[in-house]
Image (cartoon, rainbow, N blue to C red):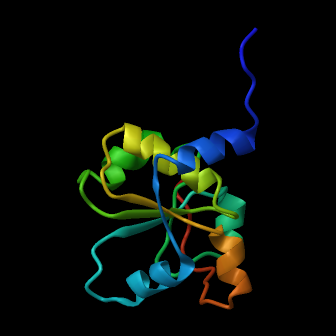
Amino acid sequence: MPLLKSFQQLCDEAKTRIQETTTDAVEARINNPDWEGILIDVRENDEFRAGHLPGAHGIGRGILEYHIADEVPDTEKEIVLYCRGGNRSALAADSLRQMGYANVHSMTGGYRKWNEEGKPETTEGEPMKH
């Protein structure tokens, strides 16, 4: 019988293979006009529309791997991913790592922590369509 793993177990394993970053470090990046990375919200489109980090690109977890090569052709470019709590973005970061992206980070605590800390957010912009 195959070993069954929970969603949380998959996320915890992914977090051992990826780089994580804090909400403060992400805020410093997006406030730095010289930062050349890309911030990607991997939540669902309705979550993105309800509020997201300034400058974030909405590319849902379900379509990220399909679109990433077109959106970020440079596999050395810094990519910061976030979701609601830090689990989906960890899985996404691990997936991009496996695809050859060398500088991917997942924001710990996700949008929920960002929001709890009173950091800036916006509803401007539209997420990528499937």
Front residue (pair 53, 80)? 80
Q: 84 left or right of 59?
A: right
Residue 128, above or below 6: below
Q: 107 left or right of 34?
A: right
Check the image and name the residue furthest to the front.
16
Front residue (pair 113, 73)? 113
Check the image and name the residue furthest to the top.
1
Residue 91, above or below 117: above
Q: Residue at x 56, y 67 (%)?
A: 126
Q: 127 left or right of 116?
A: left
Q: Quadrant of the C terminus?
A: top right
Front residue (pair 31, 103)? 103
Count of labels in the image: 0
Residue 29: x and y in percent read: 39, 82
Q: Quadrant of the N terminus?
A: top right
Residue 40: x and y in percent read: 48, 63
Residue 86: x and y in percent read: 63, 61
Q: Residue at x 64, y 80 (%)?
A: 114
Residue 65, above or below 54: above
Q: Residue at x 66, y 72 (%)?
A: 111
Front residue (pair 73, 31)? 31
Q: Residue at x 69, y 64 (%)?
A: 84
Q: Is residue 25 visible?
A: yes
Q: Is residue 130 visible?
A: no
Residue 88: x and y in percent read: 63, 51
